Amino acid sequence: MTTNSGDINYNLSTTKEILLTSEAGAKIAPQQNLAFHQGIPTGKVIVVRPDLRKQKIIGIGTSFTESSAFVLAHLDKDKRAEVMENIYSAKGANFSIARTHIGATDFAVNGRYSYAERKDDANLTSFTIDVDSDGFSNEEHEGIKDEQFDLLPMIKEAYAIKNKQEDKDLKIVASAWTAPPWMKDIEDYYIKPTAANNHQGTGGELKPQYVATYADYLIKYLDAYQEQGIDIWALTPVNEPHGNSGQWESMHFTPKTQSTFIKEHLGPKLKASAHEEVKLLIYDQNRDNMEHWTDEILADQETAPYVYGTAVHWYESTNKVNEEVFDRVHEKFPNFSIIHTEGTIDDLGKDAPEGILDPVRFKEKNWFNNDEFWWNKNATDWAYTATWAPKPEDHPIYTPVHRYARNIIVSLNHWLEGWIDWNIVLDKDGGPNHVGNFCGAPIMIDTQTGEVYYTPIYHVLAQFSKTIRPGDTALQIEQQLDGLDKDALHASAAVNDSGLISVQLLNTTKEPITYSLQIGSQYAEVTIAANAVQTVRVQL
């Protein structure tokens, strides 16, 4: 471990603030501040290097989906306003970056919709975003309290909350899961795998004659949202271009076809439109394959000028971060951003040994209003029982809080600029999802009783978001674990323009860990509680 900063004296006296979220029940709870001492410590040491500054951070956030809006529509307006304040206001999580979908996803109530439904409408005269604000009928959906609430009203309500405060940051990334079906070779939103098609489901590809039309479709979306007062910050050409085997709305690109689409159509059209400042993110799928895409697209001198960075997801593993891929991509393409645009506790409800549906340990639907589920190894993902899955060893049963906190902390150490969760709100079953792909969410609501459950994931994300703000700069971290397992303790750090350092730590073990936090020639002895996420803030 290098300690070249050990001769720098920052004149530190005490920590400014210590926050804790833990299995024992702490929820962003202030802890007693600690004194700094002169000297170079031994043993377990976390060295923060204010002299080694890295990437600027865009923020931590979550997503707007039709499913989230549908669940929130089941609350009376005052209760919904309270939930929205807890998500977007400075007194709540104060999320600063978000994602939303362009047309239908699996997390749409009924799915199978676009903004241009008329077949072969090459001029897009039928284009409309009305589906995003037409609400949910009480006749069709029992228990709806606000029939006018929907995806677009949800985004507008978040904007209204932000506009009432000094810190207004809310950057939105928009992603389409598919083009309208008539633009695609399969002329459908997706084709599910069946015995009749040899279990080869697909989302299809764009027809050659509609590649340019699809670029127009995306720009019309930007126009329509701007007319509603919503400026989209960034755009991806499609969500998950590798597809999902036709399980729900999707559409395929290869690195080469996406590069061609950007340089010949979407890039020039964006630059010629009123949305020249909209950032274009490529890829938008799992981290382990991103390098192949960046090598093809960012290395193309005609495509690269239109691209801001790469969007990634986490579904290639429940316990790995693939930070070495980030390092390689950053080394080759240092001027391009890396932004995590989707991660969730997927396949909620899949059975597992001594796991989530074990009646001895938990009642049925044990993740609702039960913090123990989220703090222990009870979750599985899509590949847990799939023997055909690539690298099944990367998909063991896992602890939800650890997956989130580890992924964020380690990613920030390896050039990530922004991190976005998937659905912010779902019902107690992890839906609605029109194809049964139930997932966890930071906030889960019983739509029959109106009970709102803020899961430990909410508190962890809120703690990160409140202390990692847009414009902060990541700092180099050096760790000496002194015999600890390498997954026992994770740490990252960032500093704002006022010199306030925020160190984020995760203790994955069932015992407290005492470590020395070293900054320059001084250190403080800190204990992080068992199974906990801790933030230590220090003013330089």
Image: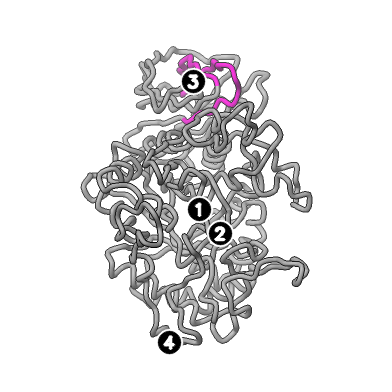
The C terminus lies in quadrant: top left
Q: Is residue 333 above or below residue 24?
A: below
Q: Which residue is mark 2?
A: 284
Q: CA distance from mark 1 to mark 3?
A: 30 Å
Residue 123 image label: 4
Q: CA distance from mark 2 to mark 1?
A: 7 Å
SS type, badge 1 = strand
- Graded by Cα atoms within 10 Å as few (under 14), some (14 to 19) or many (20 or more), the crowding at tag 2 reads many
Dominant SS type (magenta): strand
Q: Which residue is mark 1?
A: 341
Amino acid type, residue under disc 2 in the picture: Asp
Amino acid type, residue under disc 3 in the picture: Ala
Q: Position of residue 57 (x, y in %)?
A: 43, 45
SS type, badge 2 = strand
Q: Pick whichever, 41 or 486, lies toward us.
A: 486
Amino acid type, residue under disc 4 in the picture: Asn
Mark 1 or mark 4, which has the lower sequence index?
A: 4
